[in-house]
Image: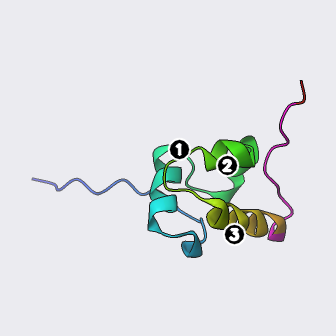
Amino acid sequence: MKQSSPVDISYDLPSSIGRPATGALAAAGYTRLDQLVRATEADILKLHGVGPKAVGVLRDALAARGLAFAVPASG
């Protein structure tokens, strides 16, 4: 009988955001930095386990790749 292998999810989020933030982002469907360009900083801050420090780290990591969080829609 062949054993099933675990699902391979490629995380490239900075480890310095902490385990609670990483878990919250993964639960919301964000496992890679490039996925965060669809979300605003406010969206990410609404996730339980993600605070201002983690958002700052993510902002810097995105900027290092020439990326940024989505801009909130004005309305």
Residue at screen point 86% across, 63% down:
66
Q: Residue at x 86, y 31 (%)?
A: 73
Q: How many marks?
A: 3
- The answer to whether residue 50 is above or below residue 37 is below
Give, as a single range, the part of the protein colored magenta: 64-73
Pick the residue in front: 70 or 7. 70
Report, in whole angstroms, how far the alpha carbon at label 2 lies from the one at label 1: 8 Å
As shown in the figure, which amino acid type bears the numbered disc 1? Answer: Gly
The residue at which mark 1 appears reads as: 29
Horizontal arrangement in the rendering, residue 67 relative to residue 54 (left or right): right
Q: Nearer the viewer, mark 2 or mark 3?
A: 3
Q: Residues within 10 Å of mark 1 (few under 14, many from 20)?
A: few
* In this picture, residue 1 sits left or right of residue 62: left
Residue 13, image x, y percentages: 59, 65
Question: Is 41 covered by the magenta stretch?
Answer: no
**Residue under label 3:** 57
Q: Depth check: 22 or 65 in front?
A: 22
Q: CA distance from mark 2 to mark 3?
A: 15 Å
Q: Is residue 29 above or below residue 63?
A: above
Closer to the observer: label 3 or label 1? 3
- Residue 9 position, x and y percent, is 46, 56
Answer few, some or many: residues within 10 Å of disc 3's Cα (few below 14, many 20 plus, some between 14 and 19): some
What type is the residue that disc 3 sits on?
Answer: Val
- Name the N-terminal-most of marks 2 and 3: 2
Secondary structure state at the residue bearing disc 3: helix
Instruction: Give residue 20's position: percent from left, percent from top.
Output: 45, 61
Farthest residue to the left: give it: 1
Q: Residue furthest front?
A: 52
Dot 2 crowding, Cα within 10 Å, few <14, some 14–19, many 20+: few
Q: Position of residue 69 (x, y in %)?
A: 78, 50
